[in-house]
Amino acid sequence: MKRWSWLLVAALVAAPTVAAPQAPQSPQDAMKEAEAKLAAGDSDGAVALLKKAMATDPMAALRLGRLRESRGELDLSVDDYRAAAEKLTGPARGEALGRMSVVQYTRGMAGADASAEAAIAADPAGVWPTIAMSYLRVHEGKADEAIALAEKAVAAGGGAAATAALAHSQEAKGDLAAAETSYRKAIAEDATAVGPVVGLATVLRETGRAAEAEPLLQKAIEAAPGAVEAYKEMARVKIALGRAQEALADANLAAAMGENDAEAQELVIETKVARSLQDVGAGQVDLAVQELTQLRDQNPGSPAVRLGLGRAQIARRDADAAAAELQKAVELDPRNAEAQYQLGYVFQVMKQNPASAVAPFEKAVAAEPGNTMFRTSLGSALLGAGQTDRAVEELTRVTGTEGYSGSQAWFYLGAAQLKAGRFKEAVPALEKALQAKPDNAEAEAYLAWSYFGLKDAEGFKAHGAKARRLGWKDPALFDRLAKVEAGQPIK
């Protein structure tokens, strides 16, 4: 073989092999690879793949939104859901918009209501649109409709999100025990979801367990730093724990993050009010009135400031000034249960006008049906206003509440039965009041009168004597007691 032939062969052998061009990765393959990376714990790798795939497959954007939401990246998840919704149609578009709406509620973003409406328009029967509409109905104050929608979503297999929506609507209805159960179930179903944690913290605070709520919220904030609702609830929890100054930092952060969130802006004011009311608790009532008056002048349309100033005036024992502020508070926000309750208190206790107290107490109960203190106060006002049968009805609801262990509702129930001449029914109610709070002179006196009505001389003498020992003042009772103790029968 000639030399040039050998050189040609050598050149061909040494030449690099040219690889055949590879077909671009399909969106379906990218999605599968992303899921594989997730299964292997490489969420960053999954995000990178899904970002590439979403350029040609809007379903990748929907999946990316779900992944980012689970990572606590709420703003980015909203962007992804929006990108998916712009290109998807039908049920897929409804899911993207529904998920986006729920995240917007958690994030404290404007547009959550509009997203829910768009979701249900895209897929009227879809699970996620139904969940989003449940949140919207709560926002509109329609708790019963919200519950019905959430129950529909749960039945359709909506999982943790549907359970959380049910809990949210139960909370709005005032059924805190049911809400707590549902929130805990939602958390067990999806430990990465922020909304159920915030909801559970709210229920814990509203049932006097704010200390339990704080660590839950701290973990939620660490997992999802953009969750405005978590910061807002943290501020409320710290207020409940008597740390209003610390709460102000959380409220300010929530307001800064949720620029268009009116509730967050109002919460800053509420926190300042709470700080002033701590001065009331420390005995610095005049200072608190001065601070709150200045805050009211700066924010005349704030129900929270009016309520706070009203409470400070109650502590100052200025009934007229308190009533004026509280009247303005309920005009600004008729559904403010605390303002209605405080106004009822001013009428009943400070002005000794139970008939005028009935209406605000009724509104407080309507706003928070599960609040036994509000119902007890309503029952007491009804009793003082001469509406005995209604008083019995309200107070029976309180004493029938699971876990109720107070004395006041039993006392007022017994007093109402006594006033109605139902002595047999009065006795057990008053006895339960005394079991919960022994050495109550007034309850002993009412129990004595009940036994007098039953013509039970021994019961009358025992409880009449105890009321006397406890310092009760009732000349009519003790005149009859002296006669019965002297041997005169009850006629």
Image (tube, grey):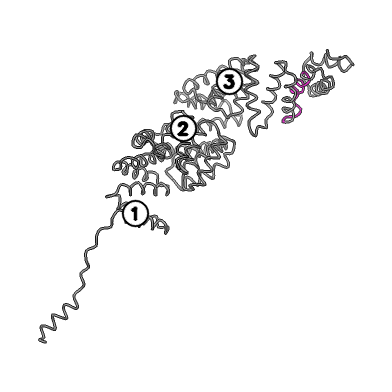
Of 341 and 420, nearer the camera is: 420
Amino acid residing under circle 2: Ala
* Label placed on residue 146: 2
Is residue 199 one of those drawn in magenta? no
Q: Callout 1 environment at 10 Å: few (<14), some (14 to 19), or many (20+)?
A: many
User: Which mark lies nearer to you, 1 or 3?
Assistant: 1
Farthest bottom residue in view: 1
Mark toward the start of the polypeptide (3 vs 2)? 2
Q: Secondary structure at mark 2?
A: helix
Q: Within 10 Å of the Cα at label 3, are there few (<14), some (14-19), or many (20+) other Cα atoms?
A: many
The residue labelled by disc 1 is 31
Q: Is residue 324 left or right of residue 225?
A: right
The boundaries of the magenta stretch are 436-449
Res. 344 mark:
3
Q: Is residue 269 above or below residue 457?
A: below
Measure the alpha-carbon separation of dots 1 and 2.
Answer: 35 Å
First in sequence: mark 1 or mark 3?
A: 1
Which label number is shown at residue 334? none
